[in-house]
Amino acid sequence: MVSASRMIGFVSALCIGGFACGGQALAQSASVALVQQDQSDCTNANVKDNHGEAPGGTIDILRNQDGSTSVKVGLSATPLTTYDFYLKCVRALGVIKTDEDGVGEAVFTIPAGGVGAVFAFDSYPAGAPPGNKFQSVQVQLK
């Protein structure tokens, strides 16, 4: 799981990268759990927080001043596996590769207007059997 200190580091890295610099505060942020669950609807309305239990992970979401959305994913799952990561029911965002301990991290950017106030993510390897799929808790940014 991504700790609070790592989240602060994420915010700092975004400022260094030019996402929200110049002393301007980020417009909105959220942190949601990524839980092992085979399926849900497009907004993951029935996905419940697993309170840090593994397998699973954390997704930190930042809506930047320019309207883009930055997403950092920390996943604890099957070792040495490539997981496709999706903005649920919209499009693929990229991949997360886990190491020999089953830990993987990735950062994605969704362009301005790419998500609304309520959205979700899912992640799984290509052709994943039941039990190796992950859903995010529903994200709500106002």
Image (tube, rainbow, N blue to C red):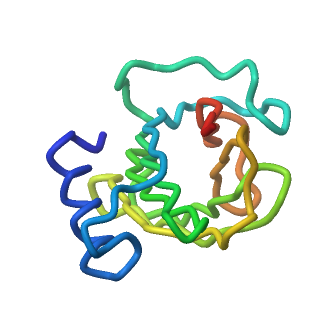
Q: Is residue 70 above or below residue 119?
A: below
Q: Is residue 52 above or below residue 1?
A: above
Residue 134: give x, y in percent of width and height.
Answer: 61, 40
Which quarter of the rendered picture does the N terminus lie within? top left
The residue under the point 72% across, 63% down is 126
Q: Tell which of 60 and 116 is nearer to you.
A: 116
Judged left or right of residue 57, residue 82 is right
Q: Tell which of 112 and 53 is nearer to you.
A: 112
Q: Quadrant of residue 72?
A: bottom left
Residue extending furthest toward the bottom: 17
Residue 47: give x, y in percent of width and height.
Answer: 66, 22
Residue 96: give x, y in percent of width and height.
Answer: 49, 65
The residue under the point 73% across, 55% down is 115
Q: Quadrant of residue 19?
A: bottom left
Q: Tell which of 7 and 67 is nearer to you.
A: 67
Which quarter of the rendered picture does the C terminus lie within? top right
Q: Is residue 83 above or below residue 7?
A: below
Residue extending furthest toward the left: 5
Q: Quadrant of residue 118?
A: top right
Judged left or right of residue 92, residue 24 is left
User: How many numbered callouts?
Assistant: 0
Residue 100: give x, y in percent of width and height.
Answer: 29, 61
